[in-house]
Amino acid sequence: MENIETKKRSIKFISFILIFIFIAYSLLTLFNNNVYAISQLISSDYNSLNDAEYPGIKSMIQNLKNQYPNWNFKILYTDLEWSSVISGEYQGHGSSPKNLVQKSANYQGEWICPICGDRPYDNGTWRCASEQAIAYMMDPRNSLNPSDIFQFEELTNPGCDMASLQSMTEGTFLKGHEQGILDTANNYNVNAYYIVARIIQEQSANGSALVSGESGYYNAFNIGASGNTTADIIANGLAYAQKKGWTTLEASISGGISFVADNYIKQGQNTLYLQKFNVTTNSGGPYNHQYQQNIMAAQSEGNTLKRTYADINSTSSSHTFIIPVYKNMPSEPAARPNASSDATVSSDLVRVNVEQSLRIRNAPNGNTTVGWLYTDEVVTRLEKATTKVNGTYWDKIQKSNGTVGYAARETYENETPYKLYLVPLNENQNPGTESPSNPDGSENTGNEENSDNTDNNEGTNQSPSSTEKVKIDETTKTIIVRPEVIAQDILDAFGGTAKIVKADGNYLENEKSVIGTGYIVEDIYTVVKKGDANGDGIVNSFDYIRIMNYIMNTKEEDNYQKQASDANNDGKVDSFDYIRVMNYIMGTKNIEI
């Protein structure tokens, strides 16, 4: 009997070790995929700043240090060109601009993007921010003063107290919730004062529909609350809260603090400035993974922190600030936009004029496709070609997701009729050389940018066909794929070209991008990747846990997630499926379609 019990304990111990190794291996595989070419450095020695490279910053920091001797400063050398930073943030026109400004008497004119003009975004009161507005708000020299400095404060826990929190929440909907905020913030090593400032920034002092509780759900941090109308914003925010099970304000606050700590602060976006303007190499790289579109957010929340410190007489206490600097910054700080004058555009922006899609190459007429441009997408032209390669001009462009490559500006010289693919937005067109239509005024209905100059047919619709890795179900309009499938496999099933977007509506980076459950193809088909239950495109331990939680009724799944969870294709989700996923990750079983 004793031998049997010993064997049982040994089996349990071995099982535990195997599961631990399995999860650890999956995590290492997942996190070793991010490689960045940018070399960044954080230094505590601001005295070593080169005045010629970063004009004015050292003297401004020294002035603050003289006023507040207990303050500490770190320099984030971003290794990014100033002009590239502004271009990178000046993206998303017509769809989802990275930066929005709330239009008012003081914020119009040069504050408003001349490309989007008066087009409303979000709840209708917001407009796309101009280049001048972005430069003004991003230039650290405009905020190196006692009023605006706190947007650069390091957001780890400085040691917050209850009386100070109660002072911050007085007269707001957060009154009475201070203890929960303080406990959770301490648990995640986050500045609790920042948490209160963030929630008030999101919901206002009186709260909004997302924290009223009328729907039975709460979303204090507005996570997932996006859309172009107030109704869309509220609906999406509450849907996220429902998914997370936030049925009380306390649960929403706790979940939101966890979200911000794990996804931003611990990822290097540990100041209000870096959460608004991500110029780090973390979380998907520069200009991505930004907490909100409000261009004033970092400054506004920083001012709330400043008032709190003033109220508790701790402004002069020890605070640490992280100041970003950029290569080739202008000699003078960016000027404040004039609300009485119209903004101008210095970036060379072009609108994509194709029927469907246009390839982005690794070099002029290169053989490798690094991404795709889509109809009416607005992108930045970094370099305008002056000579033709293989019969056309290849301009260097940058997408809003950071993809950089080369695209054909126009049809090849032996193609008729003529068509301009990259139409300038900020300069007058010369009808003789750069016209969206033919020189004779007729419209072009031909193919877009033939890859070999003869038969690529990028601009025409292709009927999809199933392959060994990709199964097209025309009845349900789903595309069922194997775990190893990438974008190129779906493109092959569609004859070489197809519009593919992620579940959140963003485009893919290139044909090597992973494909996840919930992705949409040609605005018609929904992707189901077998084993990818959480929709991140990678079959790993997170999917194993997701399937197990669904079976135990602790997680909900939509129809597509259920199809993905059915890893053994028996029409139901049960323990055999998470065993199959586990075996797949360990390399002992395949997952078929």
Image (cartoon, rainbow, N blue to C red):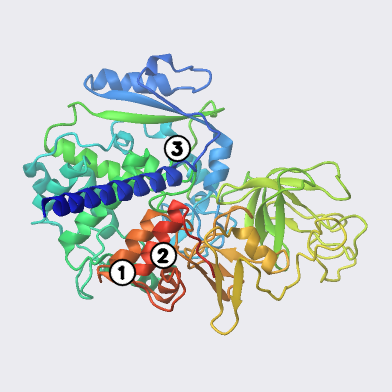
- Disc 1 is placed on an element classified as helix
Residue furthest toward the bottom?
475
Marks 2 and 1, the one that precedes in the sequence:
2
Residue 1 percent coordinates (x, y): 11, 55
Where is mark 2, residue-wise?
A: 533
Relative to 309, residue 505 above or below: below
- Disc 2 is placed on an element classified as loop
Marks 2 and 3, the one that precedes in the sequence:
3
Which quarter of the figure is the C terminus placed in?
Answer: bottom right
Residue 286 percent coordinates (x, y): 49, 42
Say whether marks 2 and 3 touch (CB < 8 Å): no
Residue type at mark 3 is Thr
- Marks 2/1: CA–CA distance: 10 Å
Which quadrant holds residue 358?
bottom right
Closer to the camera, 506 or 272?
Answer: 506
Which quadrant holds residue 522?
bottom right
Residue type at mark 2 is Ala
Q: Residue at x 32, y 36 (%)?
A: 148
- Marks 1/3: CA–CA distance: 36 Å
Relative to 36, residue 197 above or below: below
Where is mark 3, residue-wise?
A: 280
Relative to 526, residue 329 above or below: above
Q: Residue at x 39, y 40 (%)?
A: 274
Residue 378 percent coordinates (x, y): 63, 57
Marks 1 and 3, the one that precedes in the sequence:
3
Where is mark 1, residue-wise?
A: 550
Closer to the camera, 147 or 200?
Answer: 200
Determine crowd level at label 2: few under 14, some 14-19, many 20+ residues with C-alpha closer than 10 A.
many
Q: Is residue 30 left or right of residue 161?
A: right
Q: Residue at x 38, y 60 (%)?
A: 543
Determine crowd level at label 1: few under 14, some 14-19, many 20+ residues with C-alpha closer than 10 A.
some
Say whether marks 2 and 1 touch (CB < 8 Å): yes
